[in-house]
Amino acid sequence: MSVKTVLITGTSTGIGLATAVAAARNGWHVVATMRDTGKAGALLAAAEAAGVTVEVKPLDVTDPASVRDCLAGLDRLDALVNNAGAGHLGTLEQEEVDDVRAVMEVNFFGVLHVTKAALPLLRAAKGRVVTVTSVGGVVGQPFNEAYCAAKFAVEGFMESLAPVAATVGVAVSVVEPGAVGSAFVSNVGGRDTVLDAAGPYTPALTSYLARTRDAFAAAQTPQDAAAPIVGLLEAERPAFRVQTSDAARAFTATKLSDGDGSAVQTMTGAWIA
C-alpha cells in the first residue's frame, strides 16, 4: 500500500508539533504547516530525534491564497488535522467587536478555509478531517468569550458537516483537549494589560487567572494530547468526539451525555441516509 499523507496545521509548537512527529513515526507522510516556516526548528529537531522526516510548508489559515497555494502542491491527501489556533483573554465590555472578529478569523474561518480546500482531495481518498477544538468548545469559560464562541462554532459546524461528509466517504471528528503544557497559553498576549485595565472585573479576573494557573500545573503533555489525534487518523471507524485526557472527559461530561458523539451522528445521519 502507498504511504498515506496527512496535512497538519499549526505545527511549530505544542499539540501540532507532537502530532506531526507521532504521525510520522506511525508511517504517515506528514505535511507539517505553519504560518512562519522560520519557526520550524523545534519541529525539525524533534523529528530528527525521533528518526523521522516531515515536509514543512508555509500556510496561513486566515489567507485563502496561502491555503490554495499549499493545497495545490499535493497530489493526494488522506487526512487533514486542523490544529492551528490562537487563544484570547478578555470580556466584551472592555474590548472591541473587531477583537472578537479577529479571534473568529483564526479559530473558526481558518478551519473552514483549509477544510474546504482539502475536501476534494479527501473525497478522492475516502479520507478524514480531524479538528482540534477545546473543552472550551463545549463549556463556555469566563474571560474566554471570544475563544469559546469560536470553538463552539467549530464544533457546531463539524457536527453538522459530519453526516454530509460521510455520504461521500469522508469521516469528520473533533478533538477536545483540556489543559496542555505547551506554548499556547504563553502565546496569549496582553494578560497583564487586560488585568491592569480590568476595572470592576478585577476580582473576577484575578480569581480566574489563579484557577487557570492551578489547572495548568497539572496539564498533560503535548505528546499525550497528540496520541488520540493519531488514533483517529488510524481508526477504522473514528468517533466524532474525543477528549484527550480523563480531566477533559470529566470536565465536558458536566455538559455532554453523548460523550463520543455517536448518538447525534446516528440520528442526523439517518436523516440523509
Image: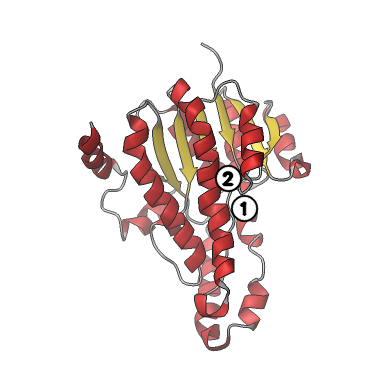
Q: CA distance from mark 2 to mark 1?
A: 8 Å
Pointer 2 or 1: first along the chain = 2
Taking 127 as reference, is 73 left or right? right
> In x, y percent, where is residue 131?
48, 43
What secondary structure is found at the residue carrying circle 2? helix
For the residues bearing labels 2 and 1, Cβ distance under 8 angstroms: yes
Q: Position of residue 12 (x, y in %)?
A: 68, 44
Which residue is at the far top? 1
Query: Tag 2: residue type?
Result: Ile
Q: Give the farthest residue toward the bottom.
A: 200
Residue type, label 1: Ser
Q: Which residue is tagged 2?
A: 15
**Residue drawn at the location 53% of the way across and 78% of the way down:** 205
* Position in image of residue 59 (x %, y %): 66, 40
Q: Which mark is residue 182?
A: 1
What is the x, y in percent for residue 133?
Answer: 47, 50
Q: Is residue 166 left or right of residue 85?
A: left
